[in-house]
Amino acid sequence: MTSHRRSTGWLEGLTHPIVLAPMAGATDGAMAAAVTVAGGLGTMAFAYGATPEIVRRETAVARAAGPFGIGLMNWQIGQQEGVLEAVVEAGPALLSLSFGDPGEVVPRVRELHPGLAIATQVGTVKEAQRALEIGVDVLVARGSEGGGHGLGAVSTLPLLQQVLDLAADVPVLAAGGIATGRGVAAALAAGAVGVWVGTPFAACLESPALPAVKAAMIAADSSQTIFTRAFDVAQRLDWPEQFGGRALTNDFTQEWADRLPELAAQVGESDDLTLRMRAARSEGDLSLAPVYAGQSVGLVHSERSVADVVAELATYRHYLRAALDRLG
């Protein structure tokens, strides 16, 4: 295991141990700033089409409010010329390097900025062990309930317990299925230093997600999600095969989620479905386009402000005190 001295400065100064999950298409500089102002740590993702200029623009907005975090996808970094360097130069409090082995990227970041705190999302004990060997500063135990991309292997509570046992002195954030103060209290009581929350924020007023996407999340029930690679196959995205994505069910998943080989064959023969999927995403046609959301979507009932979501999550203190009172 690496002897790197892990950085924990990113956690200091937070009013609440709440980190906005970096979500492509649902976070930006303004969104990150709103979460930071509300007392958490705002983050943003730089994924498809990101450029150094976009990084500089969005991080300038976030920086005006205070500390911020950034999320990158390991498998995509080699396709984004100059983005990693621009991200490090922007000076985030926390850099998330997830989805794929971070072994090649972490040393590059350490060379550019030795003191930058690096997090990575893990979905299994094996992934957690690898991240610890590499020397990341923060583990995000992301359960299969979580929205968007990840491993659909282990749910949050069992994964969190295993990662906490393994991680010893390394901070662990809990992710997946957390949308209320009760969920935050459960994660903190288990030993997590904080929570990594996506779905409730994606439906916020400040989220750059399309209005139709937010409306679909607000209307959905927790049982109306599916973990699938079908959207990535249809869009010809180069996600590694071990990663799928949790999204709301729709007409497309009903037709194709269980027929991936046939879907891949159809996409390989024609660009039609790929072009229609891309158009559906820009136009908000949610019978075809994905709405990435976790099982906590059933706890999202209205389009709230970021401040309201943080305030709800911050009721964790009440639940922790109530639990201690019940135990005497």
Image: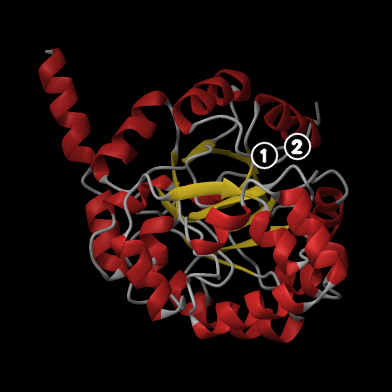
The three-letter code of the residue at mark 1 reads Arg
Helix, strand or loop at disc 2?
loop
Q: Any mark on residue 217, and which?
A: none
Residue 64 visible to an observer of this rendering: no
Tag nearer the camera, 2 or 1: 2
Q: Please name the residue that numbered disc 1 is placed on.
A: 6
Q: How far apart are the two marked residues, 2 and 1, measured between alpha carbons? A: 8 Å
Label 1 environment density (alpha carbons within 10 Å; few <14, some 14–19, many ≥20)? some
Q: Any mark on residue 135, and which?
A: 2
Residue 59 visible to an observer of this rendering: yes
- Identify the image quadrant of residue 205: bottom left
> Observer-nearest residue: 137 or 214?
214
> Observer-nearest residue: 275 or 54?
275
Residue 223: image x %, image y %? Answer: 37, 44
Vertical position of residue 99 compared to residue 264: above or below:
above
The three-letter code of the residue at mark 2 reads Gly
Q: Residue at x 79, y 50 (%)?
A: 240
Quadrant occupied by the C terminus: top left
Which residue occupies the extreme top position in the image? 328
| Colouring rule applied to residues | secondary structure
Vertical position of residue 325 compared to residue 180: above or below:
above
- Identify the image quadrant of residue 194: top left
Q: Which residue is drawn at 23% across and 57% down?
A: 311
Decide: marks 2, 1 in contact (CB < 8 A)?
yes
- Reading the chain from its start, which is encountered first: label 2 or label 1? 1
Vertical position of residue 227 compared to residue 53: above or below:
above
> Observer-nearest residue: 123 or 242?
242
Quadrant occupied by the N terminus: top right
Seen in the image, is 290 located left or right of residue 224? right
Q: Residue at x 11, y 18 (%)?
A: 326
Label 2 environment density (alpha carbons within 10 Å; few <14, some 14–19, many ≥20)? many
